[in-house]
Amino acid sequence: MLRCLKYVLISVTALALLATPARADTTWREEHCRYNKDTNVWTPFEVRQTIRCATAKWPVPGGFSKAISVALCESGYDLQDPGGDGYAGTFQQSERYWRSRYHHLRPAGWKLQSSATNPRANTVISIRMAHGAGWSAWSCAWSTARRPTTTSSSSAAR
């Protein structure tokens, strides 16, 4: 009986120790909107989670659904759009203004990649822009009925 109790206590302790880092990891990911585990490959699910998290932290007009609509319209969900046409990333940030926007809008203490083609960085900076000034920088946001057929730099964040 005592031997059985000993094994139960060891098992419960081991499970508790294994579960703690996962909860800490989940909390950190939620606090910093970091859902991608491999920084070179993003899935639509990971980007949606990042947009959901960012819009919860920095509310935007129209909320999460509007942000998703704008991202779909801007990039057609080409999650790592390489740019080259003057606009890049999920929300088609202007490459001309990206460095300044990144510098001024990056949350303190957050490790964001500095590239506009990184979906997390592009999303967080874009949501913070929309939080502060609305969606006026994105012509795609002017009409929720508009859906992309191709990526268009004419509708990108100015």
Image (cartoon, rainbow, N blue to C red):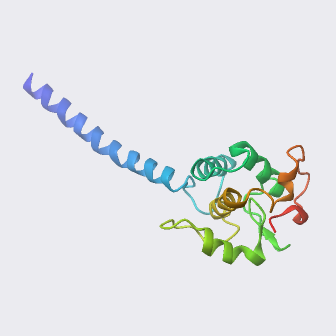
In the image, is 51 to the left or to the right of 71? left
The residue at 74%/64% (across/down) is: 89
Residue 30 spot, x, y in % from top left: 50, 50
The residue nearer to you, when weighing 115 against 123, is: 123
In the displayed orientation, state which residue is furthest to the left: 2
**Residue 43 vs residue 98, the one in the foreground:** 98
Residue 113 place in picture, x, y as percent: 59, 69
In the picture, which quadrant includes the N terminus?
A: top left
**Quarter-of-image position of residue 123:** bottom right
Up the image or down, 34 lies above or below 4; here it is: below
Residue 114 appears in the picture as rendered: no
Quarter of the picture holding the C terminus: bottom right
Q: Is residue 9 left or right of residue 140?
A: left
Residue positioned 28% across, 40% down in the render = 16
Residue lying at 86% horizontally and 58% vertically, measured from the top left: 139
Image position, residue 103 (x, y; %): 61, 75
Query: Taking 145 as reference, is 79 above or below it?
Result: below
> Looking at the image, which residue sits at the far front?
133
81 to the left or right of 33: right
Q: Is residue 157 left or right of residue 8?
A: right
In the image, residue 86 above or below residue 18: below
Query: Which of the two residues, 73 or 8, is positioned nearer the viewer here?
Result: 73
Tell me if residue 92 comes above or below residue 56 in the rendering: below
